[in-house]
Image (spheres, coloured by chain):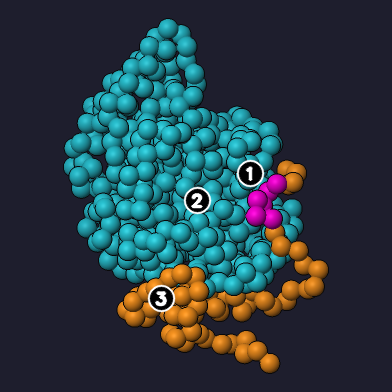
Amino acid sequence: MPDQNHQPSEEEITLLLGRSGLTVSPEQLERCRAMVARLEAAARRLRENLKRNDEPAGVFLMRGHNP
Amino acid sequence: MIDELCYLSIAEAGPRLKSKQLSPVELTNAFLGRIEEIDSRLHSFVLVTREEALRQARAAEKEISSGQYRGPMHGIPIGLKDLIETAGIRTTAHSKVLIDHIPSEDATVVSRLKEAGSVVLGKLGCLEFAHGSPSPDQAWPPVRNPWNLEHGFTGGSSTGSASAVAAGLVMGALGTDTGGSIRNPASFCGIAGLMPTYGRVSRRGVIPYSFSLDHCGPMAWTAQDCAIMLQAMAGHDPDDPSSVDVPVPDYGAGLDEGIRGVRIGVIRHFYESRLSPEDETRRAFEAALQELAKLDAVLEEVKLRELEDYDDCKAVIAEAEFFAVHEKDLIERLEDYGANLRLRAIPGGLIRAVDYIQAQRQRRKLVAETQALFAGYDAMVTLCTYGPAPNISADEPTHFFQRPNLTAVFNVTGNPAISICTGFERMGLPLAMQIVGKPFDEATILRIAHVYEQATPWRRRRPSLG
């Protein structure tokens, strides 16, 4: 079972940022961790209560909206 | 005399310009003089385009003198957030990354305001790429709040726009809003700031933060002035893929019709658990509700989804899209970004594709539920911020992530929303509420805001700047 409450460690963050092409200092990394945790928590909650057929919003939200 | 001219609203100056009682050159010189006198303390401008402004003012004067009056923005001095591109004029997004960026074309909103005869005084400071926060390593000092220069935070990200309007350095300004960047500084600086419906105002030529959440809108001393500016800015732009081809109404036509019988949903649950009953912002909001009731609006409590649901959605979408916009520069020249923005931007590179898609799936549900609730109301009202402007030194890089944002809700849903002043707290700092409308119904929220401003004394107080 995947761990749905996983909080990435500094090593994991470094690895993942490396895959994005970013190299950050240990000090920057430490200060980023609160943001990373916040986004992880948001992503976890956003997975909940979605049904198979729930479609995403369009990037251009109001196209097709008929006022 | 200079102060008197600079504290005119757009609605007051227009008829004087049209009737030639007031000259666009005289008006522009008054503002340029005031900028020179005061802005070294506020830092609201990053560039004053003095010669070009005077050229535009002379052209306006010539046209008006020869009977070619273009309308209520003709000869009106404005400023542009430095996130909005201007042909031949440096546009930096308040960042060293774009310190030499000189666009070849005006953004569509700039072209439209120029066509309406506006005089552009220059480019206004902002938070870096609309997403940073003040840090000492930036190319310009942080913009100060004219209501308290020492205390000083303007909110963001349209910092210079809000500060300059409140201080009487421009009659109106353009701002942009991805999570509250028009409404938040409008609130902290005691002015009116309108985020139009997503798709109402073109974003072509506006440096992006987050494609699916970005809006561009007017900031001015009054809601009526926002209506006048929006009239010149709004309308379909085939060069902006988010732009919607719907008719633009006459925003000034119904402003004085009153709000008898207008159904307003009151959203309290967003902030109730976070503020004490005696909190000044909360009490000012309750007093504003009483005022709306006295004006014969019909008020009723309404509950949307929990604030966190919108905030999660906004955070994941905005950070992922911001990283996508900046990926190349973040990798190749990270150190050119301000220290605080680096900390905010880097985690966006860790958001998985599936997380972004889940956020957009949740967003669709949030939009559908919110618009269904709107069917029973003409507008909704809630707080704009949890309190008055915080001290500038208290704005930590990740501060904005620690409490769910009251304004980002309507970036997620795309509804129009305006921030207006609801009074002042004990230190003299402004307080505010936001009025939210149905998609493409800016006219109703502008009317409610205008009627409220007319009925209350808050528009008669200006910051004391000596």
Tell me if label 3 and label 2 are in contact, CB under 8 Å: no
The cyan chain is B
For chain A, what colour was chosen?
Answer: orange
The residue nearer to you, when weighing B287 against A43, is: A43
* Image position of B104 with respect to B213: above or below: above
Which chain contains the residue that carries disc 3? A
Which chain contains the residue that carries disc 2? B
The residue under label 2 is which amino acid type?
A: Pro
Image position, residue A59 (x, y; %): 65, 55
Residue furthest right in the image: A53
The dot on residue B241 is: 1
Q: Which tag, 2 or 1, sits closer to the chain's start?
A: 2
Alpha carbon separation for disc pair 2 and 1: 13 Å
Circle 2 sits on which residue? B208
Span highlighted in magenta in the image: A58-63
Q: Residues within 10 Å of mark 1 (few under 14, many from 20)?
A: some
Q: Residue visible at 73% across and 47% down?
A: A65
Q: Is residue B145 visible?
A: no
Image position, residue B464 (x, y; %): 24, 45
Alpha carbon separation for disc pair 3 and 2: 23 Å
Which chain contains the residue that carries disc 1? B
The residue nearer to you, when weighing B359 against B430, is: B359
The residue under label 3 is which amino acid type?
A: Cys
Circle 3 sits on which residue? A32
Q: Residue visible at 32% across and 79% down?
A: A27
